[in-house]
Amino acid sequence: MNVHVVGYPKVGTTWLTRLLAAALDSPCGGIYKAARSIAIEGEDRKGEHYVGSGHAIPASNGSQAPLAPNHLEMNIDKLGDFPIILMFRDPRDVVVSARHHWRMDSIDMAIDCVINGVWATTHGGGFASFYHSWLDSGVSTVKTSYAELRSDTRGVVSSL
């Protein structure tokens, strides 16, 4: 069975993916196994799961034009019973993390990226659009946050 960890960039998806995969003794990587991902690890683990992480937005076969150019879509019509964990993080923390990670010249540039989704890929628009696309999709998700994971890492991973 696959487990998908999705969230906006810089909210902790890779961290949670690696923790969960280690707990399940399973390999992990990107949602799309063929895609290169910094989450790839444990390819020799014997667990029966694959834990994938990514920043895709939900889309169905009947969807119209993409919400934004170059964004990643997860085809919700083909998910089956795969669990989806939706990660959240305070957007102010996302701004600070993004500025540091991508070495942006100013905090204003990082704020613009988070509000408008101006990254290498656009992730369905900005932070709010990304999460509204998931929350309005009707797809069943388990929700957790970076703050919860930081305050009780063992408890959150065990509950998932």
Image: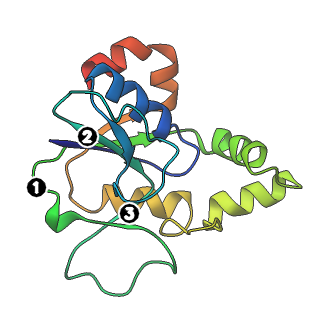
Residue 120 place in picture, x, y as percent:
63, 67
- 10 Å neighbourhood of mark 3: few (<14), some, or many (≥20)? many
Q: Which residue is mark 2?
A: 50
Q: Quadrant of residue 44?
A: top left
Q: Nearer the viewer, mark 2 or mark 3?
A: 2
Is the C terminus in the top left, top right, bottom left or bottom right quadrant?
top left
- Going 30% across and 61% down the picture, which residue do you hit? 136
Tag 3: residue type?
Answer: Ile
In the rendered image, the vertical position of residue 96 relative to residue 25, given as above or below: below
**Marker count (numbered):** 3
Q: Which residue is mark 3?
A: 57
Tag 1: residue type?
Answer: Gly
Is the N terminus in the top left, top right, bottom left or bottom right quadrant?
top left
- Going 28% across and 27% down the picture, which residue do you hit? 45
The secondary structure type at the circle numbered 3 is: strand
Q: Nearer the viewer, mark 3 or mark 1?
A: 1
In the rendered image, the vertical position of residue 147 relative to residue 66, given as above or below: above
Q: Earlier in the sequence, mark 2 or mark 3?
A: 2
Q: Residue furthest front?
A: 44
Q: Which residue is mark 1?
A: 80
Residue 46 place in picture, x, y as percent:
21, 27
As drawn, is 67 to the left or to the right of 92? left
- Going 52% across and 81% down the picture, which residue do you hit? 69
- Going 34% across and 36% down the picture, which residue do you hit? 43
Determine contact: label 3, label 1, CB under 8 Å: no
Q: Residue furthest bottom?
A: 65
